[in-house]
Image (tube, helix red, strand yellow):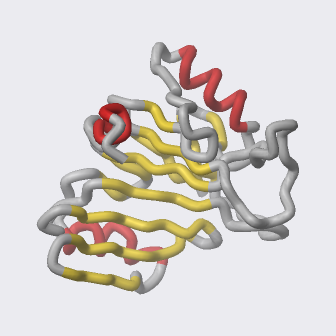
Amino acid sequence: MDLVLDPPLGAGPVRLGMTPDEAVAAVSPWGTPEIETDDDETVIHTKCREIPVTVFLEGAGDAVTAVELWWPGEGRRTDVRVLLYGDDVFTTPAEDLFRRVEERGWTVDRTEPEHPFVPGVCLGFTRRTSQEVPRTQDGLPVHVTAVLVAGEHYYDVRLRGDL
């Protein structure tokens, strides 16, 4: 099974801008999702087989703002591929993945090496884990451990240095 990333529109069956009910319906074929709601956001947790998926409805909680998919973890295998323009995000070495992203004319901001992102598209990556995985000379995992697809202005706060 393939989950195709389509930045900045969505990931797999989840599209940015979906209502909570639409997002739940989109992921329900994978099993019953867990829904957390508070005053300013709704978060939907689910799994596509072994791939953990988090759907964020931030702000008023009335529309999907981001979708994050996680590597299944050390020693776990899956037949689900998370694809970004044909590359499997969790099995393609991160530097190769970033190079291919840059070949599309986009910039990968590596200011925070454990959390690189592509502004304007918006893609965010995580290269952090406490698990025993192959690492680069810099100590980073060779592969990304999570990928987030969001709207084009999602990372503007990082570009302004507000964090």
Q: In which image quadrant can residue 92 be found? A: top right
16 relative to 30 in the view: left or right = left
146 relative to 128 in the view: left or right = left
Residue 156 in view (yes/no): yes
Q: Residue at x 29, y 52 (%)?
A: 15
Q: Residue furthest front?
A: 162
Q: Residue at x 64, y 71 (%)?
A: 50
Residue 9 in view (yes/no): no
Residue 28 in picture, x, y percent from top left: 38, 77
Q: In which image quadrant can residue 145 be found? A: bottom right
40 relative to 85 in the view: left or right = left
Q: Residue at x 55, y 19 (%)?
A: 102
Q: Is residue 13 placed above or below 109 in the rendered structure?
A: below
Residue 69 in picture, x, y percent from top left: 52, 59
Q: Residue at x 52, y 52 (%)?
A: 3
The front one of 86 and 119 is 119
